[in-house]
Amino acid sequence: MSVSTEADLVTGFKAAFRGYPTGVAIISVAGPDGPAGLTASSVASVSLAPPALSFSVMDSPSARLIAGAGSLVVNLLGAAHAGLAHDFARPGGPRFTADQAWTTLPTGEPALDDAQAVLRCVPLHRVPVGASTVLIVAVTNAFVGTAGARLIYHERRFLTEPRT
């Protein structure tokens, strides 16, 4: 198995991760003009002591707000949130509407009321990589909801499956 050109490498890299199922989250922040957020499938646990996680964001207005924020919330989603994940994944999708069940934490960040988990975080490291930024954040508060059916991102689609 070999890759002969940079274009082949990029194509192969995309195909490899398109076929790799991941969990889905919405990262949210309190921006200067109101809440901002985006869908992320790159959330990963980094450390238990201190509790920390990582995710990456690509260059967009919401991503810039998230990358520069002093605090943020990682809302871990379940199957009931497939439509919401899609809305936050596309430019111009409805965000933070009354029917989406958002609340504001006492610290000011937007949090999804019925998320499987809400993790309030503060940045530890911001690492620029190409057109993306990897954030490593410390978890300062964890609110765990009721686990339900799973939401995964696979082959460029949000898929649901029952919990077994």
Image (tube, rainbow, N blue to C red):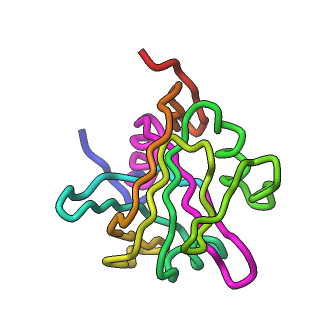
Q: Nearer the viewer, residue 134 or 20?
A: 134
Residue at the extreme left of the image, as rendered: 49
Residue 139 placement: quadrant:
bottom left
Position of residue 161 measured from the top left corner of the image (x, y, whole percent):
53, 21
Vertical relation: 139 (above or below) 79: below
Question: Closer to the camera, 9 or 158?
Answer: 158
- Residue at 53 percent of width and 52 percent of height: 75
Residue at the image position 17 percent from the left and 61 percent from the top: 49
In this view, which residue lies farthest toward the top? 164
- Where is residue 88 drawn, in percent x and y? 68, 54
Residue 29 is one of the magenta-drawn residues: yes
Q: Residue at x 63, y 75 (%)?
A: 30
Viewer-closest of 141 and 86: 141
The magenta segment is 9-38
Residue 20 painted magenta: yes
105 relative to 129 in the view: left or right: right
Residue 69 vertical position relative to residue 41 in the rendered view, above or below: below
Residue sitting farthest toward the front:
106
Q: Count the marks: how many?
A: 0
Which quarter shows the N terminus? Answer: top left
Residue drawn at (55%, 35%) of the image: 78
Position of 2 relative to 74 (above/below)? above
Quadrant containing the C terminus is: top left
Q: Position of residue 53 (x, y in %)?
A: 33, 60
Residue 157 image offset from top left, x and y in percent = 61, 35
Among the 4 quarters of the image, the one containing residue 80: top right
In the drawing, does residue 65 fall left or right of residue 3?
Answer: right
- The answer to which of 149 and 7 lies nearer the viewer is 149
